[in-house]
């Protein structure tokens, strides 16, 4: 694929994923509305899957203001599997698209598979636009490979990694709660 073709695909996937994000739900409290909602007696009720342990992580990028709360439910049986993965937040199209693509990639996978994908995505972000030079790893990433273009811009890498860091942290919290 030529650089121009990759750039075109990059733009299409990121714009589509940010306009129609997968896994996005409204569940995280917003600091501005939290105070008025509590005063009005509004509460949020969340149900979790039976035989699953939830974990949740809030991530914030102070350089641009992107925010995401990632909620994961991990099966109690071995091998631990991601039974539910949702997120709430706001930010630039890159952070929102990365969260959406992440949900598509890891929802339903084992924790080990999800962590492997997180490592491969992180490696892609460290490539500074060069890519992975490994077709099998690029195939594993599916649509997430288009974020190779983002890796050219150090200030945007944090946007792309925001949700993935939330995924890693929320899984760690879910697994820690099992002990």
Image (tube, rainbow, N blue to C red):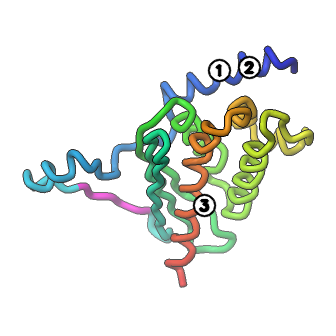
Q: Which residue is mark 2?
A: 7
Mark number displayed over residue 168: 3
Range shown magenta = 44-48
Vertical order, 16 against 178 (above or below):
above
In front: 167, or 165? 165
Quarter of the view holding residue 175? bottom right
Quarter of the view holding residue 151? top right
- Examine the residues drawn in magenta and state their main secondary structure: loop
Say whether residue 35 is left or right of residue 104. Answer: left
The structure residue drawn at horizontal position 73% and vertical position 43%, both measured from the top left corner, is 125
Say whether residue 36 is left or right of residue 77. Answer: left
Disc 1 crowd, CA 10 A, few/some/many (<14, 14-19, 20+): some
The structure residue drawn at horizontal position 83% and vertical position 37%, both measured from the top left corner, is 131
Mark 3 vs 1, N-terminal side: 1
Label 1 secondary element: helix
Q: Position of residue 124 (x, y in %)?
A: 77, 43
Mark number displayed over residue 11: 1
Q: Position of residue 38 (x, y in %)?
A: 14, 56
Q: Position of residue 60 (x, y in %)?
A: 46, 51
Q: Position of residue 73 (x, y in %)?
A: 51, 62
């Amino acid at each position: 694929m030529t650089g121009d073709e990759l750039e075109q695909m990059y733009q299409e996937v990121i714009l589509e994923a940010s306009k129609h994000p997968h896994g996005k739900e409204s569940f995280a409290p917003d600091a501005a509305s939290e105070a008025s909602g509590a005063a009005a007696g509004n509460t949020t009720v969340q149900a979790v899957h039976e035989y699953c342990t939830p974990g949740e992580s809030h991530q914030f990028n102070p350089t641009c203001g992107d925010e995401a709360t990632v909620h994961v439910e991990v099966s109690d049986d071995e091998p631990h599997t991601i039974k539910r993965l949702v997120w709430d937040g706001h930010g630039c199209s890159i952070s929102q698209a990365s969260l959406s693509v992440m949900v598509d990639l890891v929802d339903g996978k084992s924790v080990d598979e999800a962590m492997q994908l997180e490592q491969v995505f992180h490696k892609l972000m460290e490539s500074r636009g060069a890519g992975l030079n490994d077709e099998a790893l690029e195939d594993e990433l599916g649509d997430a490979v288009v974020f190779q273009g983002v890796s050219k811009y150090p200030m945007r890498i944090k946007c792309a990694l925001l949700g993935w860091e939330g995924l890693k942290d929320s899984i760690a919290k879910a697994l820690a709660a099992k002990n």
